[in-house]
Image (cartoon, rainbow, N blue to C red):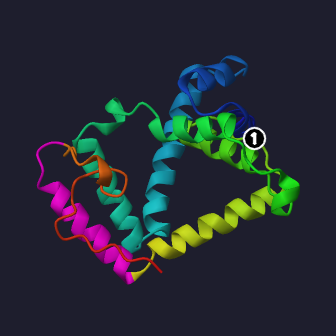
Amino acid sequence: MKKKVLNHLLENGCSSHSVDEVIAASKFNKNSVLEYMNQRIQMAQENVHEECDSLSFSNIESWLQVFKKWNLPELCLYEPALVINAIANNEDLPEPKELDGVDLKSVYKFLGNALMGLPQPNLDAKSAEFLAKEFEILVGEANTEVGDSETGRINQKLETYKELPFCTQREKSSIDPLCLSDNLNFQRK
């Protein structure tokens, strides 16, 4: 049963509708399956905390708490996913042969679906390798002493706010969406 549920969720996403579908298609009692899944989710959450005990993970946890405090999950309209999908569907992207086989359209669709919580299309080997390398670079840039220090400092400042700050300086909104530029020193390699 576990394998069947996991395969279905991988193929169809993790929406409540998808969970109901897999339960309806099984011979098991719905309450038993939901109880089992809830137990496994709780165990996974506990294991993640044990396995990812690092400053970077703590910073991510802090951000999530700040976002929950501001009720951002309720306000989110999947803007990043919409932008990524708009790029995939509307921009003239180089052909894969021009990029050593990397299919940017597929990469953008993969990211757009991931941001929406939908199943991601399979990527060809070159595109998957490219995306994995880009993620490694991103993680490498974020997991530095400077990155951790800046993240902690920004998070502390944001925790003092009673509501989500908004910026009226349009020329800075893309690099400073939370209007924190007073003492920010973003460093680039």
Q: Amino acid at mark 1?
A: Pro
* Quarter in which the N terminus is drawn: top right
Left or right position of 78 against 11? left
Displayed quadrant of residue 75: top left
Q: Residues within 10 Å of mark 1 (few under 14, many from 20)?
A: some
Near-viewer residue (183 or 78): 183
x 58%, y 72%: residue = 137
Which contiguous range is marked in magenta? Answer: 145-163
Query: Which element carries disc 1, helix, strand or loop?
Result: loop
Membership of 154 in magenta stretch:
yes
**Residue 177, percent from left and from top:** 30, 51
**Residue 59, percent from left and from top:** 34, 65
Near-viewer residue (155 or 188): 188
Work out whether 24 lies above or below 163. above
Displayed quadrant of residue 34: top right
Work out whether 182 lies above or below 68. below
Give the residue at the far top of this rendering. Answer: 24
Membership of 24 in magenta stretch:
no
x 33%, y 30%: residue = 74
Whether residue 119 can be seen here: no
x 34%, y 72%: residue = 186
Label 1 sits on residue: 121
Work out whether 153 lies above or below 12. below
**Residue 7, percent from left and from top:** 74, 38
Whether residue 36 can be seen here: yes
Near-viewer residue (76 or 167): 167
x 51%, y 52%: residue = 44
**Residue 71, percent from left and from top:** 27, 36
Q: Main secondary structure of the magenta part?
A: helix
Displayed quadrant of residue 163: top left
